[in-house]
Structure formats: structure tokens, C-alpha cells
Amino acid sequence: MKRNHGFTLVELAVALAIIGLLLGMLMVPLNAQVDQQRYNDSQKQLGLITEAILGFALANGRFPCPATGTTPSTVAGAGLENKPGSACASPQGVVPWATLGITETDPWGRRITYRVRDSFADDPSGGMQTTFSLTDAGNVTVTTGAASPVTITSDAVAVVISHGKNGLGAFQSDGTQLAGAAGDEAENADNDGNFVNRTNAPEFDDILAWISSNIAKSRMVAAGRLP
């Protein structure tokens, strides 16, 4: 009688190695597709956030103050604009998602950085009007970064930032900030009013959107919030 021999252990190991290699080759483009989809979703989300900020400004006569990034989402008041009196506690923090009624985090699960010019967000008289006028400009600067930065704008009223896949510099839902941001990414997390928007830089994955003072003022004039 003839015996039917199965695969040897060596043959099985080789077959499993080949299958693993093929699966790994398939996962690379799949991961790239997931990353690209999240990037696209983040860009759309930032566009919606800027519209929500402008909507708040039209309804309230001022821009919303940032929320405190270090407040865990489990704590009461998380996501509300930090405005203890007539002015913002700080011009920079995270998007006040609870105040605006929007999602807390970006597609990577991290909070979105937000900075606003204080004179566009204050409320000194307790009414529905800030101190800025048609002659005022923004003071948030965005450049191309790198060794020879080119200024994209120095007249932004507000900027919002998703810190991308690596998330360096972003605040998380537990209130901690991811450390390790360096170079141009550090510029987007150092709380100084200067920001970087780069393209085609493998080490940089932050995504930005901003509102110019001209757009802010034209919207508010149309809504009757400015003369």
C-alpha cells in the first residue's frame, strides 16, 4: 500500500512565510489608504470647525474663546470656552467643542488646537460686541516653515490645527499633551501665535485652517454685527 505524505514542518513554515509576506504587502497600501482618508476627513473637519466658529461670531458678536486643553473630558466644563470674565483666559488652547456643539477630537482621536486674537473674542461691555472695529487686523501668522519660511498670512484672526497622525503637540481627551514635537511641529504647539503650514514634508503632518480678518469682518458686517 502506498502512503500519502503531508507537508513537512519545513514546507509549512515556508508556506506560512510566503502568506505572511503577501499579507504584509497588502497591508502597506491599505494603511496608506486609511491614512489618506483620515487626512481628507481632517481637512473637511477643520473646514466645518471654521464655519462653526464664524457661526458663533455671527450669533454672539465675538469669536469663541479657546477651551482649556488640560481639562480631562470626564471633568465638568470640559470643552467649554474658558472665559472667566470679559476676556479669554488665554488666546490659545483647544477648540471649545462643547460650546460649539461639535466633535471633540480629530480623526486620530486628539483635540484640535485653536488660537484667536483676543480683541476679536473679548466682551468688555457685557453686550454682544467685541472691541475690534473694521480697521483692526488679525495677529496670527502662518508661514511655510523650513529653513527659509515664506509668510502665507499675518492677518489671521483664528487658526485651528489637527496635529496629524503622529499627534505630537496635541492634547488628548485625558488632558495630557503629547510630547516630542520638534522643528516646525513644535511651532504649532508652543503657544506663541506663529504657526507653520507645510506640504511635501515627511516629518511634518500637521493640518491647518485659518480665518482671515477680512473674512471675519465681511461676515459680521453682513450679519449686522459691525457697522
Image: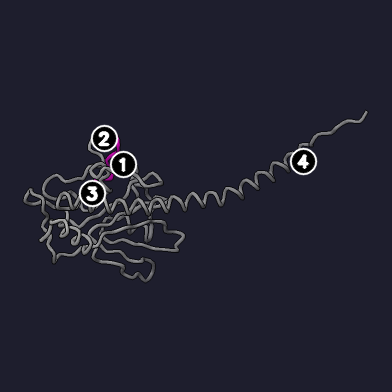
- In the shown orientation, is residue 129 left or right of residue 215? left
- Identify the residue under disc 2: 75
| Magenta stretch bounds | 66-75
Is-magenta flag for residue 139? Answer: no
| Circle 3 or circle 1, nearest the eye | 3
Instruction: State yes or no: discs 2 and 1 in contact (Cβ < 8 Å).
Output: yes
Q: Quick one: which residue is furthest to the right in this view?
A: 1
Give the residue displayed 31% in from the left and 41% down from the top: 175
Give the residue displayed 56% in from the left and 51% down from the top: 28
Is-magenta flag for residue 71? Answer: yes
Q: Amino acid at mark 3?
A: Pro
Residue 93 or residue 210, whichever sits in front: 210
Badge 3 or badge 1: first in the primary sequence: 3
Q: Secondary structure at mark 2?
A: loop
- Identify the residue under disc 1: 175
- Identify the residue under disc 4: 11
Whole-percent x, y for residue 114 in the image: 27, 52
- Identify the residue under disc 3: 66
Q: Amino acid at mark 1?
A: Gly
The CA distance from mark 3 to mark 4 is: 61 Å
Whole-percent x, y for residue 121 in the image: 16, 53
Quadrant in the picture for residue 207: bottom left
Which is the main secondary structure of the residues drawn in magenta? loop
Badge 3 or badge 4: first in the primary sequence: 4
